[in-house]
Every structure is written in C-alpha cells, then in structure tokens.
Image (tube, rainbow, N blue to C red):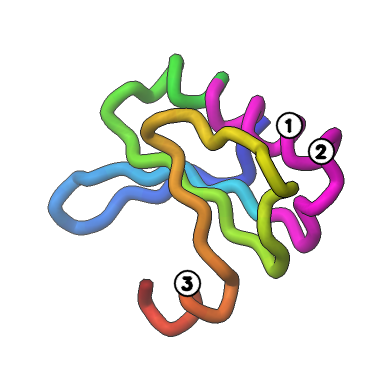
Amino acid sequence: MVDFLATDFQGRRQLIQVAADISAPSTFEREVRALTEACKEFPDAAALLVTETEAPHGSRVPKGIGIVPVWQWLLGC
C-alpha cells in the first residue's frame, strides 16, 4: 500500500511513498513494489519515493518511479 495519493489544483495525481532508509535491498524492493502496485490502480499518476538515503548500489529503479531526497522534496523539488 502506498503512503499518499495527492492531487493538485490542475487534477494531476502523484503517488508518494516515504521511507527513511532504503539502503537495504529488501526495504528498497518493498517500497518500490508498493509504488508499482499503486501505479496499476492509478496509471495517470506520477510515482515518487521520498527518502533520506540512497538506493542500494546496483539496484534498478523501474521506469516511471522517481527517487528524491527528503530535503529536496521539502524545498519543493
């Protein structure tokens, strides 16, 4: 299950998954899986993973999922 589904005033949707630490491969996979599943239900929504850490070295981020540091997200991306 994804953490947030946000809609702006223009009707654009964004799926937001929040995880403090995605450096462990199992955590990274779990968080990405939640976004991937939510994207099936809301195919028009942009998908974003907000985190304090980087993805595990060598991990593959599926197409259409963005990863952004929490500080950058808080400042407005």
Residue 24 lies in the magenta-colored region = yes
| Mark 2 or mark 3: whose residue is earlier in sequence | 2
Which residue is disc 2 drawn over? 25
Magenta residues (range): 19-36
Secondary structure that dominates the magenta span: helix
Dot 3 amino acid type: Trp
Which mark is nearer the camera, 2 or 3?
2
Between the residue at mark 1 and the residue at mark 2, the CA separation in whole angstroms equals 6 Å
* Residue 13 as seen in the image, left or right of residue 22: left
Q: Are marks 1 and 2 in contact (CB under 8 Å)?
A: yes
Q: Are marks 2 and 3 in contact (CB under 8 Å)?
A: no
Choose top left, top right, bottom left or bottom right for residue 71: bottom right
* Residue 35 as seen in the image, left or right of residue 54: left
Choose top left, top right, bottom left or bottom right for residue 39: top left
| Mark 1 or mark 3: whose residue is earlier in sequence | 1
In the rendered view of the protein, which quadrant contains the N terminus? top right
Which residue is disc 3 drawn over? 73
